Amino acid sequence: MRVWAEIIVLGTVALGLTACSGSERNALACADCPEFVEIPAGEMMLGSEPGPNDPDGSILSRQSYSVPAPFYTSRYEITRSDWWACESDGVCPEARVGRITGFWHHFFEPDDRKPIVMLTMDEIQLYIGWLSARTGLNCRLPTEFEWEYMARAGSTDEFHFGPSATYRDANFDDLSSCYPDLPGERCRADPAADQRNYRSRLRPVGSYAPNAWGLYDLHGNAGELTGSCSSGTFSEARSAGSIDCEYFVDRGGSFASPAGRSRLSSRIAFAKHALDSVTVGFRPICEMHDPE
């Protein structure tokens, strides 16, 4: 059974982040690896006071978070094509998403540029181990702090492109239940009047504009799994790379999430045994070597 324990964290990014152009240059050349972007060091603030419609304990107090050294991350969510490179090396198993039939089949038309989903944590770790061997770097899932840091890219809004979002901005569920009291939610008067806005399926990565650091699809499409355990404190969520959590934090929302649940600050907890969801993907980071 999939667990949907949702926690909302409202964040603001502190001044002092290094400006980045969002260049399309690949920051880390590696055969058969995903395209990488270098994320600069800096500091940000997370947390906010809970609003009247936020569940008890879902908003954590404001506090500073620092990234002491730059790191690399994938420009896009890991795609089926990326996974195939690992699979063809005999490291990763065949992706289950390619064998879906019946009701769910229309969600997953063949397209190597769509995010890979329906993976267990063990399978994700196989890919990350393969990526580490390919790059010679320590690659892992980001913490949810690292995820929000790189997703914001200096933005203080609810979305990296502004304070609110519509279907034109990201691949989320624009016709699902609306939460008018959540920041960033723009409800439509008659959602049923324009069914073409409701995609309810994965789209190829890069279908929408990137953030200021050149990262795509941070809102909606596939949710992005982090290495943080779902818990009630920021300190417990800072640890990196754990695979022993009972519940993991998923960030960014998915194609099945409304805009209010796809904000930069939104958190969803998934049980470890339920990570192989049709809505959950991942975007690894790789730590840079210390200079000689």
Image (cartoon, grey):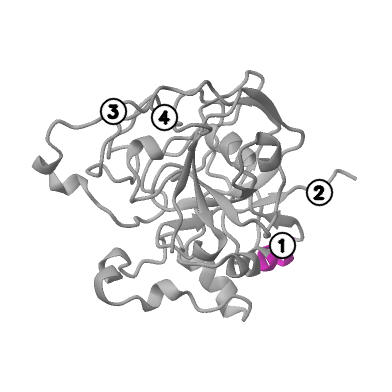
Q: CA distance from mark 3 to mark 4?
A: 19 Å
- The quadrant of the image that shows the N terminus is bottom left
Q: What residue lies at 44% left-to-right and 51% top-to-bottom?
A: 4
Disc 2 residue type (three-letter): His
Which residue position is annotated with label 1? 132
Amino acid type assigned to the residue bearing label 3 in the image = Pro
* Comes first in the chain, label 1 or label 3: 1
> Along the polypeptide, which appears first: circle 1 or circle 2?
1
The answer to whether residue 106 is above or below residue 39 is: below
Q: Position of residue 74 (x, y in %)?
A: 57, 51
Q: Are marks 1 and 3 in contact (CB under 8 Å)?
A: no
- Which element carries disc 4, helix, strand or loop? loop
Image quadrant holding the C terminus, namely: top right
User: Residue at point 53% right, 68% down?
Assistant: 83
Any part of residue 153 in sight = yes
Image coords of residue 41 (percent x, y): 71, 32
**What span is in magenta?**
129-135
* 247 over 41 or under it: above or below: below
